[in-house]
């Protein structure tokens, strides 16, 4: 069996183990990382272009509107940029363009195909830049590539408010891990979505065209494809709700009727109205985010927001 087939087999086994644990728990859940197979990644790209989904275009405008230039000035010449969960590596172009003679770009992502394609694109666009991809789960400690110039100032990059998809303890653990990986004196440029009118938030996660609904339901389609489950997708609906106590948007899949689904020889029962909780997207208040960063070992050096205060981008210093 090829290495790729073995890796795919391990992924499927991990997905099945998470699904069995999550769907037999008293409150059914599925970890949001499984939303991103090839179809999920394609749907997420489509979400980022929706009129209701303000985070991507707002963060991009903040980066372009002076934030990337100021972060680049503070990081200094010859910086090495390490992007956590680089995905399609689009926003990093704004940062690389602002930096004086960046020494290296290290995209870190768990999906080797995506990572290879994105790294090749950046290398083609930035001749002379050392592009050193790392295949790793960016939520766990990983080693920076040996070829990274030891003296290059380290600048971490974690855009998109992906930090919001961790629970508060996980977010703090991620920040502490990023600090350990990047080292003393490093900086981290990170996007964090802000608390705002619940109607704006719920529309961003339940768009009129139904793209986010398809993104969420794709998780059940993925369990059918990869784990032989028999979910009837028409018997579930997407739901996005603002949880004011936890200050997060929750995505759920609601069972429209009493039903049973089979998964790996198990029958999993659903009551009408019962939900599978598939994602949390935490929103922050600036003071709360600065406190979270401090607990993770970072000082907030700068914070930028847009005029409507929808989104924030932070430069942190280790
Ligand atoms: C990737 N992450 C930051 C997105 C978010 O906004 O929480 C995922 C997403 N889920 C639904 N829409 C977008």
Image: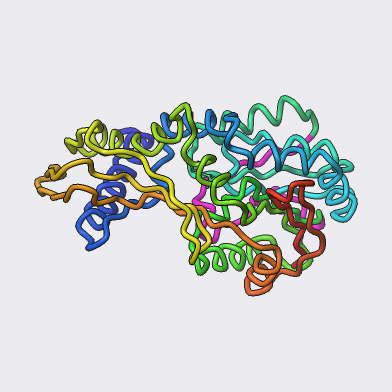
Picture quarter with the C terminus? bottom right
Q: Residue 250 location in percent, x, y?
A: 43, 52
Work out whether residue 190 or residue 47 is closer to the camera in this orientation and state it. Answer: 47
Residue beneath the point at 72% across and 25% down: 124
What colour scheme does the image use? rainbow
Residue farthest along the bottom direction in this orientation = 295
Q: In this orientation, which residue lies closer to the viewer: 142 or 58?
A: 58
* In the displayed structure image, the side of residue 74 where residue 110 appears, left or right: left
Could you say where residue 214 lies in the image, as x and y percent from the top left? Answer: 39, 31
Q: Is residue 223 above or below residue 285?
A: above
Residue 65 forms part of the magenta stretch: no
Q: Which residues lie in the magenta part?
A: 129-151
**Looking at the image, which residue is at 70% across and 63% down?**
286
Q: Is residue 215 left or right of residue 177?
A: left
Left or right: 151 as drawn, with respect to 263: right
Residue 247 position (above or below residue 117): below
Q: Which residue is drawn at the image coordinates 56% and 62% (left, top)?
A: 174
Q: Quadrant of residue 101?
A: top right
Report the number of numbered marks.
0
Which secondary structure class fits the magenta region best? loop
Q: Quadrant of the N terminus?
A: top left
Q: Check the image and report above or below for 49 versus 80.
A: above
Which residue is more in the foreground, 269 or 92?
269
Q: Position of residue 247 (x, y in %)?
A: 53, 61
- Residue 173 in percent (x, y) is at 54, 67
Name the residue at 22% across, 39% down: 227
């Amino acid at each position: 069996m090829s290495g790729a087939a073995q890796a795919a087999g391990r992924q499927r086994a991990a997905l099945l183990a998470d699904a069995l644990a999550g769907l037999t728990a008293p409150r059914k859940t599925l970890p949001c990382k499984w939303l991103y197979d090839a179809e999920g990644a394609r749907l997420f790209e489509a979400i980022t272009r929706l009129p209701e989904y303000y985070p991507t275009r707002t963060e991009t405008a903040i980066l372009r509107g002076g934030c990337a230039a100021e972060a680049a000035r503070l990081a200094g010449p010859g910086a090495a940029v390490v992007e956590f969960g680089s995905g399609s590596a689009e926003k990093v172009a704004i940062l690389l363009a602002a930096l004086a003679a960046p020494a290296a770009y290290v995209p870190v992502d768990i999906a080797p195909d995506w990572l290879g394609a994105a790294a090749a694109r950046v290398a083609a666009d930035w001749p002379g830049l050392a592009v050193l991809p790392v295949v790793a789960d960016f939520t766990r400690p990983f080693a920076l590539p040996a070829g990274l110039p030891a003296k290059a100032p380290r600048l971490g990059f974690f855009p998109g408010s992906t930090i919001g998809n961790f629970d508060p303890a996980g977010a703090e653990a991620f920040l502490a891990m990023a600090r350990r990986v990047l080292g003393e004196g490093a900086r981290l440029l990170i996007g964090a979505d802000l608390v705002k009118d619940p109607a704006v938030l719920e529309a961003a996660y339940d768009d009129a065209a139904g793209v986010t609904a398809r993104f969420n339901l794709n998780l059940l389609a993925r369990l059918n494809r990869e784990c032989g489950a028999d979910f009837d997708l028409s018997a579930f609906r997407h739901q996005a709700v603002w949880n004011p106590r936890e200050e997060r948007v929750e995505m759920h899949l609601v069972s429209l009727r009493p039903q049973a689904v089979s998964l790996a020889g198990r029958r999993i029962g659903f009551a009408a109205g019962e939900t599978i909780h598939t994602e949390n997207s935490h929103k922050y208040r600036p003071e709360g985010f600065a406190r979270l960063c401090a607990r993770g070992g970072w000082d907030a050096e700068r914070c930028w927001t847009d005029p409507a205060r929808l989104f924030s981008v932070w430069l942190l210093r280790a």
